[in-house]
Amino acid sequence: MSSAPDSGWFGHPKGLSTLFFTEMWERMSYYGMRAMLVLFMTASLQQEGLGFTVASAAAIYGLYTGAVYFLGLPGGWLADRLFGGQKAVWYGGIIIMCGHIILAVPHDYSFFIGLIFVATGTGLLKPNISAMVGQLYSDADERRDGGYAIYYMGINLGSLIGYYVCGYFMENVGWHWAFGAAAVGMAIGLVQYKRSLNNLPEHSVLPANPLGPKGTSRAWGGIAAFVIIAAAVTTAAMTGAIVINPTVVAGYVAVVFTIIFFVYFGVIYFTGKLTDAEKQRMWALFLVCIASACFWSGFEQAGSSLNLFARDYTDRLIGTFEIPTTWFQSLNSLFIIALSPFFAALWINLSKSLVSPSYSVKCALGLIIMASGFLVMFMAAHYAAEGLKVAPYWLVTTYFLHTVGELCLSPVALSAVSKLSPKRYTGQMMGVFVLTYSIGNIIAGLLAGNFDPNNVQEIPNLYLQIALFSIGVGVVLVLMTFKAKVWEKQGLEEKAS
């Protein structure tokens, strides 16, 4: 890749500003809407909600968030083989905006149609806009890491705007006005993206590995088939021709995604003609993947059970001002912005001190720290079970611990995929790794289904079970520390040679 010739935006290519603000507004729309999903679905009909049970709402939430990550796989393929990065981001943003507009329409059928649009558009936009950031720099350009750090800041700024704006509209104006605010955010992102397209490198216009005429026809046929099937299933469900139990579907999808993960991982391991060192490194990577799936199954309680706890059992009054429920989720973004520089320096200083924990140990540490947040919620839920509204600092502490866990695991896991994967399978292994996000999100939804507002006495047990399971997995990973360290060391030494 050729480096962009300019440094017109804080010492970085101007194209970074285009992608920064596009991603910021897309994340505003995504997180702003996502924060309301479970609240809207579980609100009563009198409150203009959908009146779903917590189990159904949480399962739908898990399916939606899991689908967003899963659809990134075909989204990346379509950009590489059919659209090119620039068009993929543009089309994806338009589909997302249309989805939010549909959600803003107060109609019984609009909700699920809107979710399908948003998930599909996000799957097309998200992987490709991230890849385009890398295309701004040459392989030797030392600004690359700094560029991604600035870009990551845009993600967190966007989520903050979404939580605050959509949360305020939800509490003070109405559900559908809040969904409409998300649509406006995406529209702003699209306008600035279109106006500043000239900042992006020319090679991002064309697909990296274009299909031939026959392949292009087949690809469009596949897109048409997807649209027809999605429309048919949605119509059948809306008209009552078929009855879909979201909890059952989520369970099956979790199993299918898990099988896909194991099969794909196994095919690469057993048939990929790997060297012994590459196989050892794959075992270390396998542990990281397990930690990732378990981590996100707990962390993603933020939008479901922790969101409901904030609404129903937390004292949100400060004087006469009532904190909107969704604002608690913004704590994660605030803590990430505050703590990211500290953790970046931490790993560097540890390395200089010749203390370099293996990838699996860092991930296990993140998992255990995240689990400690649920021990905090276990204690808070006990007070709620006694009929008390708990102070906000319980959730603040939990989100702090979850953020610390995320900073220990998430960037480390991504680095592990790039460094431990066999060179010729790095892209595919990143796709396999993304499946752990989908699996974790769907399991998170199934777990949150046990949050029963009518049986508050069982809520402490839910959080305790999540904590103990996560700690258990983390301990197992720590016990395998030495072996994993050997695998990584041998594999990386061969890779360097």
Image (cartoon, rainbow, N blue to C red):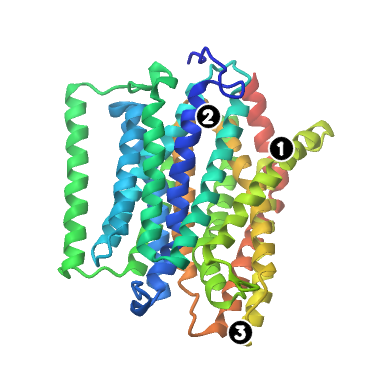
- Decide which of tag 3 and tag 2 comes sooner along the chain: 3
Extreme residue in the front direction: 320
Residue drawn at x 28%, y 28% as measured from the top left:
82
SS at circle 1 = helix
Q: Amino acid at mark 1?
A: Ala
Q: What residue type is disc 2 on?
A: Pro
Label 2, secondary structure: give it: loop
Q: Quadrant of the C terminus?
A: top right
Q: Residue at x 59, y 17 (%)?
A: 141
Q: Which mark is residue 344?
A: 1
Drawn side of residue 391 relative to residue 203, left or right: right
Front-lying residue, 388 or 223: 388
For badge 3, the amino acid type reads: Ala
Pointer 3: what residue? 385
The span from disc 3 to disc 1 (Cα, nearest Å) is 40 Å
Residue 360 visible: no
Q: How many marks?
A: 3
Residue under label 2: 422
